Amino acid sequence: MAWGKTDEQMSADAEQRAAQKEQARREREEAEYWESPLGQADWARQNGNTFFQIEIPHTTLRGVTNAAYNSRTQASRSTMPVPPIFSPKSGS
C-alpha cells in the first residue's frame, strides 16, 4: 500500500506492542514483589541473612481464633492468601 502499512506490518506492530505491554506488566509485578515484605524477606535470605524482622500494623492482620476459648465463638480463618516465604521465585 502506498499510503500506509500492509496488513502484515500492522499485525507485526500489534504483536510487538502486546509483547512490550506484557514485559512492562512483568517488570511492574516483579518490582512490586521485591518492595513487598515477602520480597524483602526473600532478598534477605538470598543474601545470606539468617534473621529478618518486619513490623506490620495489627489492624491489617487477621488470624485464627480458638473456638475452645469461647464455646459460642466459631473458628475463623484469614481470607488473605499467605504464600510461602522461602520458596524460590517462579517465572524466572
Image (spheres, rainbow, N blue to C red):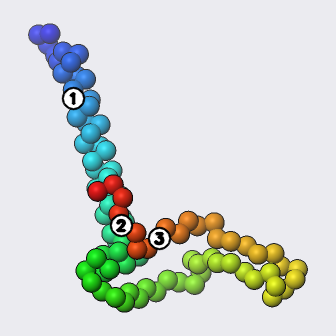
Q: Position of residue 63 (x, y in %)?
A: 64, 78
Mark sitting on residue 88: 2
Q: What's under tag 3, amino acid-wise?
A: Pro
User: Residue visible at 41% across and 88% down?
Assistant: 53
**What amino acid does circle 2 point to?**
Pro
Which residue is at a point 57% across and 77% down the rendered structure image? 60
Using the numbered discs, state the Cα–Cα distance from disc 3 to disc 1 in whole angstroms.
Answer: 40 Å
Quarter assignment of residue 58: bottom right
Q: Is residue 12 above or below residue 73?
A: above
- 91 displayed left or right of 77: left
Q: CA distance from mark 2 to mark 3?
A: 9 Å
Calculate the distance from the C-alpha at mark 1 to the C-alpha at mark 2. Answer: 35 Å
Disc 3 or disc 1, which is closer to the eye?
A: 3
Pointer 1 residue: 13
Say whether disc 1 or disc 2 marks the residue closer to the N-terminus: 1
Q: Which residue is mark 3?
A: 84
**For mark 1, does the 10 Å Cα neighbourhood hold few (<14), some (14 to 19), or many (20 or more) residues?**
few
Left or right of 9: which side holds 24? Answer: right
Q: Where on the picture, by quarter, is residue 30?
A: bottom left
Residue 40 at least partly seen: no
Give whichever of discs 3 and 1 has the lower sequence position. 1
Q: Residue furthest right?
A: 72
